[in-house]
Structure formats: structure tokens, C-alpha cells
Image (cartoon, coloured by chain):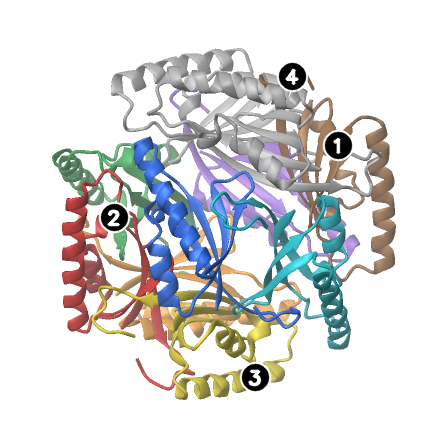
Chain colours: A brown, D purple, E green, F orange, G red, H blue, I yellow, J cyan
Amino acid sequence: MLFMVQMIVQIPSTLAPEVADEIKRREKEYSQQLQREGKWRHLWRVVGEYANVSIFDVASNDELHTLLSGLPLFPYMQIKVTPLANHPSSIVQE
Amino acid sequence: MLFMVQMIVQIPSTLAPEVADEIKRREKEYSQQLQREGKWRHLWRVVGEYANVSIFDVASNDELHTLLSGLPLFPYMQIKVTPLANHPSSIVQE
Amino acid sequence: MLFMVQMIVQIPSTLAPEVADEIKRREKEYSQQLQREGKWRHLWRVVGEYANVSIFDVASNDELHTLLSGLPLFPYMQIKVTPLANHPSSIVQE
Amino acid sequence: MLFMVQMIVQIPSTLAPEVADEIKRREKEYSQQLQREGKWRHLWRVVGEYANVSIFDVASNDELHTLLSGLPLFPYMQIKVTPLANHPSSIVQE
Amino acid sequence: MLFMVQMIVQIPSTLAPEVADEIKRREKEYSQQLQREGKWRHLWRVVGEYANVSIFDVASNDELHTLLSGLPLFPYMQIKVTPLANHPSSIVQE
Amino acid sequence: MLFMVQMIVQIPSTLAPEVADEIKRREKEYSQQLQREGKWRHLWRVVGEYANVSIFDVASNDELHTLLSGLPLFPYMQIKVTPLANHPSSIVQE
Amino acid sequence: MLFMVQMIVQIPSTLAPEVADEIKRREKEYSQQLQREGKWRHLWRVVGEYANVSIFDVASNDELHTLLSGLPLFPYMQIKVTPLANHPSSIVQE
Amino acid sequence: MLFMVQMIVQIPSTLAPEVADEIKRREKEYSQQLQREGKWRHLWRVVGEYANVSIFDVASNDELHTLLSGLPLFPYMQIKVTPLANHPSSIVQE
Amino acid sequence: MLFMVQMIVQIPSTLAPEVADEIKRREKEYSQQLQREGKWRHLWRVVGEYANVSIFDVASNDELHTLLSGLPLFPYMQIKVTPLANHPSSIVQE
Amino acid sequence: MLFMVQMIVQIPSTLAPEVADEIKRREKEYSQQLQREGKWRHLWRVVGEYANVSIFDVASNDELHTLLSGLPLFPYMQIKVTPLANHPSSIVQE
């Protein structure tokens, strides 16, 4: 079951750079683990912004919230979730 | 080069149903042709809306505008284009 | 799996009253059938508006879109879908 | 008398984590007490956000404001209240 | 129990003037009846707009929706309802 | 001459609680003095928000600005002023 | 007493051109009469829009509403009124 | 003196296609004449929209309004004007 | 050449009061100098807000930006500029 | 391939002035280098704002994101990117 997830990162200027770097390092690791498991199907950068557009493939709303709220950068993100369905004109079922 | 394209369809109630149906039939054909050519990489329905989220893969802005303005439903759509770039945490280059 | 669905009805003034009435009659029947099946869990009127707040319980995004796009009033509605998850402070699992 | 209440939590980064934790502990207790009393009828998490959608059942506007302004997290919340009425198509009176 | 109700009137230009006039005549009568009953406590014009700000005093959300949806101009209005509570600094209880 | 004034209070978390309390004490005193003089005709709390809806009765725009900018909480408020006129359907002149 | 009034004109395409022209002719006459009386102090065109920014000088809110609702183009305008006060840094009292 | 002008075209579906085509033909001619005179310095299509971003070079606000309100498509456009100034980091004066 | 300039002042609570007072003193002086030169033609307070509506009369966009960016309060202001043109119904050329 | 890029600069008041000055010095150098290379084709100041409108000419979305995220002021900017295409009425191909 697919969801578009749009994430905007806003790290407060009061966060120490080395703390921010450590959070970003764990974010990358966490993200790549979910990508390898097939749950985070696509991850694209929005040009000119510290933001991304992602496609998640999960079994339920609860699973999606667990994954998103577990993001190391979650406290510093503004997230918007859009549920997706199969499109009748699509040539593939995804 | 990837772009997210969000399309909202708004067919005016004054359009004759058979005309609308013919436009939708051509829209589907046009869309599936572009999907087969690999230019319209993904096409998802937004749940609860007459709208879609799409990913296009084109060589230039001009090519993207040519493809979008050629959509049979173009005069009845509100379209928003977001340029995408490779994300440093993505495990694939797409 | 629960979703909040907010529906705003906008019937164009050009629609003949008897056609509108017939659509509303079928809408009510359709809605009550889904309520009896347990898929449309709650249905409330927004005070002062021709709008409702609803809670749907479905197995997937695709099922939800099928149910919503099948609404007789669907062509005359503006719909917003919000995926819901279990809240850690809730005393029930719903 | 039912109200939809949408709450978005925004804890300032300057609040000490142990203070925030104590406030959240009291918030949970307070919320569960109101749920057991039947005043806070539903409590759902919005997927991907530090936010909830709730349904309150109270005797008056004054009672609702007293309950909401008594939330331990009230100073850190953005709250939107929508009065609900019985819907003519609903199969239950709630 | 008090509610602020903001109403914006938008009569479509396709409505025949004599029909519109008859609706406005009934609207005035209906409004003045509710004012005399004490349910429509205040009614003010917004300067420069075909809009009003009103204060209603009703026993429940359901009563308020019944009153508002009974307005002869209801199909041509955009309405926003804000529940009000007693203010601790107010020198009167109203 | 009547004006609707909507005030949203946003006290920065960096303000010392005892300073905030003293400002609120003076705000209440100031507000009640204006109410007794008949200039602040109504004061209602917006349910669920640290905000109010008020009706002022003043002789001029200049007088209204003087009253509002003299509010002890003025530096911490977002204020919106809407000029009101007599409504032709109102049964009282106010 | 001064007010900024911002007017946006939106004449529906269904209005016959000769009717529209007659309304505009009367609008101009009405506007110039108010300018000569000193009530419509300034009238500027917003560059690139069928809109204006105006300054009115009136004795009361009621007078302003009477003047604005008497505009021949009033049914085809979106109007926003902003009350103005004397500025402490202004070198003139106006 | 430079201005950014953003134009969105919205031709009503009730306009006869041959009338629309004639207006567009005159629009193109008008636009190209102004480009040749150096007043319409740049004209770009916004990808996916019936809209453009333009740069005008004019002697005054009045001249700009005269040029824009003379556009054959002016009655069917939503236009936003942004005054531009020389940027201290620009390597050219334009 | 006239421009409407709308300024909203937002002085951060971290700025020392005596520094803020000195900036405001210089702002007043600067503003009154421009008024005496005829470049800042009108300056009005927006009722209930720490904001103003102004009319500037300058020779070019560059001059206007130089004047505005030289305001002592410029770093603490949100500014919106609207170019104005002569209105065909105005009885004066200004 | 052209893109309009709109940048709004928001330097937090907590940044030391000498640090800010050094960042701005590097920003100017970086910007002028890109202008000389022909990648940053136009750079204009928005009148009255700490903001600019720019036109970039790049080979791909990835190149544009690399250039923008390398801006010394990037962490303090809000950036909006609009892809541009050739306009059929333009007398030049750019």
C-alpha cells in the first residue's frame, strides 16, 4: 500500500553542529535500511530545498506512523502524508 | 531527469458527457503510450480525489512542457511541477 | 485501518432540482449501506455547512478510493483524506 | 454534544527534556481520565505528525474550553475546534 | 451557549432578480423572528461586504445547525461557526 | 461606532512567568475598566484557543487604536480589526 | 476618519457589454461626485490589475458602508476595508 | 526600469473557439511588437501551466499599466507585478 | 511615480529595549526627513497593528529600494510594495 | 535549460554580525563566479525585500540543486524553483 510522504527539514540554529551531524548520520543509516527492506520505495530531493519527496510501501497506517516517527530527524521535520491508490490508466500495478 | 507532476482534473459541468468520455479515452491512450516509452515513469491516483501524482523522466524542461500541454485533458487540469534531484541518502541513482 | 474523510458538497446551481434530489436519495442509501457494513464508522454534519466529517475503516487505500469515488455525489464534492493511527494515550485500540 | 478537536503539538526546543517528559506524562493521565469519563470519545494520531484528531462529548462550550485549557500541553498546542451535529444520513444518533 | 457565525452571501448572477428578492424578503423575516426569540442575539453588517457577523445563543450544536440550514439564503452562503465561551476578564456572564 | 476585534495572544516562552502574570493582571484591570466605560462592549473567549472575540464601541479609528495599543498584552498579540455597520435586518440599532 | 479600501472588479463574462459599459459610466460619475465632496480622498489603479487602492474620509462606519454599497459596480466587486489612524511619525495630521 | 510580470491565462469555456483563436493571434502580434521595441525584455513559459513569467522594461508605472491593460488577453488573465531593482551582487547593470 | 508600501514591524523580544528605542528614534527622524522631501507622501497607522500603510513618490524602482532598505527598522520589517498608476476616474493627476 | 529561482534571505538575529558579513562576502563571490560562467543568467533585487529573483541556465536538475545548496547563505534562505520553457510567442530562443 503506497503513500507519498513529503518531508521538509528545519534544524533549529541552536542545535550544536556536531549533534546535528550525528542525527543526520543516523537518519541516513535508518533511511537506507528501510530502502533495503523495500518499505521506503523512492527518495528524491526537491531541487533548491532541504526537503524530499518519498514513496513508502507499508502494510498499514500504523506501520507508516511507526516508521516516520522513528526517523532521527522527526522532531525537526514537517511531514505531509498522501495516500495513493492504483490509477486506472497505469500500465503497471504498483 | 525527474519531475514530480501533480494533476487535478476539473471538467466543467457544461461539457457534454460523450465529449468528456472521448477526451478521457484519448487521455488514457496518450498516457499509456508515454508510460511505455519510459517518459511517464509512475502514475498514482490520490485517494478520494480526481487527481494524480506522477513522476516524469524527460531530457529537458521544454520536452516536459510539450508532453504536458499535449494531454487531451490539459485544458481541464490544474498542474504543479516540482523538479527532483538525486538524494544523497538514496541507495539507487534514479 | 482508519481514515478521517472530510467532504464538502458543492452542487452547481445549473443541476435540475429533481436530478439533484435523486442523486441525494442514492447517496443516502449508499452511505447507509456502507455504515451497516462497518466501513463508514462515523458520519457527522459540520455545523452551518453542507459538509461532513467521517471516519472510514477499510483494508487498504485502494478500497477507500473505490468507496469514495463510488459516492453518487462524488462529482460534486471536495474531499480530503487524512490517514489515522492508533494513539499511545488512547484507552482503546480502534 | 460533539466537537471535533484537532491538536498540533509544538514543544519549543528550549524546554528541558525532563520537563517535557513530565508534562507528557501528566497529559496522558489527564487524557485517559477524560476518556474514561466519556468526555473524550475518540483520540487518533495523525499519521506522520505530532498531532491528533479527537472527538469530545460535552454539555457546553464552556465545559469544552475548561477541558482543553486544562491540558498540560495546552501552552504548546495549536487547537482547532469544529462543532458537529447529527447527520441526516447517519444510521445512529451520536 | 454562544457562537459567532460569519456569513458571506454569494448570489449567482444566473438567479432571476425577482426570485432573489423574494428569498431576501423571507430571509429578513426569518432572521427577525429568531432575533425576537433571543436566539440570534446580534447581527452586524461587515463594512464594504455583502456579509455579516452574528452572535447566536442556542441550546446545542444541533439546534444551531437547524437554524442555519433553514436560512432562505443558506444555499448561497459561505458560513463559518466559532464556538464562544465565557471570558475570565468579562464583567458580565453572557 | 462598532468594531469587531479578534485578538490572539502569543506570549514568548522566554518571558519570565512572574512578569507574564503581572502583565495579565494589568490586562484584566485595563479590560474591565474599558468594559465599565462601555467602550469594550463584549468580550468572549474562543473555545480551545488563547484568543478572544471582542466588540468595541468607539468614537473614531484613532480612539480605537489608542485603546488597543494601550493593552498591556499588545506586544504579544496578533490583532485583526473589522469595522461593523448597522444591518438592515437587525431589529435593534446598535 | 480615514479608511483604506481595496477594490477588485470581476465582471462576469455573461454580462452584456453594453450593460457593463453603462454600469462603468455610472460608476465613474458616482466616484467623481464623492471625490469632489472630499469623501473619496484618493483613487489609484493597481498596475496590471482591474483593481484600485482608495482612501476614504468619512464620519462613521455606517456612512462608509452606505457609500460603498451604493457603488454601481458593488455587486461585481471584492472589497477589503482597513481602518487607518494617525501615525506618530507623520508630519501632518490627516 | 524592470518589473517581473507573472501572467496566468484563464479563458472561460463559454468563449467560442474561433473568438479565442483570434484573440490569441492578436496577443502574439502585440507581444512580439513590444519585444521588438525592447519593452518586453523576456517571455518564458511556466512548465505545465498556461502561464508565463515576463520581464518588462518601462519608463514608469503608468506606462506598464497601459501596456498590460492593452493585452488582448487582459480580460482573461490574472496578473501579478513585482518591481525589480539592481542587485549589488549582479555583475551587470540591467 | 507612486507606490503603496505596507510595512509590518516585528522587533524580536531578544533586542534590548534601549537599542530598540534608539532604532525607533532614528526611524522617526529618517521617515520625517523623507516626508519633508516629498518622497514619503503619506504615512498611516493600521488600527490595532504595529504596521503602516504608506504612499511613496519616487523616480525609479532603484530609488525606492534604496529608501526602504535604508530604514533603521528595515531588518525587523516585513514589507510589501504595490506599484500604482493613474486611475481614469480620478479627478486629479497624482 | 532555464529555471526561475526566487530566494528570500532570513538571517537569524542570533548570528554574530561578523559571521553574517563573512557569509555574505562569500555569497557575493560565489554568485559572481556563477554569473561569469553563464549559469546564473540574471539576478535582480525584489524592491523592499531582502530577496531576489534569478534566472539559472543549467544542464540538469541535479546541477541546479548542487549550485543552490552550495550557496553560502543556503541555510538561511527560503528558495522556490520554477522550471521555464520556451514560449511560442517569444521572438528569441533562450
Q: Image check: J83 left or right of A34?
A: left
Which residue is located at x 13 percent, y 35 percent?
E22
Residue H24 location in percent, x, y?
38, 41
Asked which secondary structure carries label 1, the reply is strand
Tell me where residue A28 appears, x and y as whole percent: 84, 42
User: Dot 4 corresponds to which residue?
Assistant: A91
Say which residue label 2 marks. G76
Q: Which of I68 and D6 is in front in this view?
A: I68
Q: Is residue A52 above or below residue I15?
A: above
Badge 2, how many Cα within 10 Å: few under 14, some, many 20+?
Answer: some
Q: In this image, G78 relative to A65: left or right? A: left
Which one is closest to the eye, mark 2 or mark 3?
2
Q: Quadrant of residue A63?
A: top right
Reading the image, the residue beneath label 3 is I21
Q: What residue type is labelled 1?
A: His
Both marks 3 and 1 on one chain: no
Give neighbour class at mark 3: few <14, some 14-19, many 20+ (Cα, 10 Å): few
Q: How far apart are marks 4 and 1 (CA)?
A: 19 Å
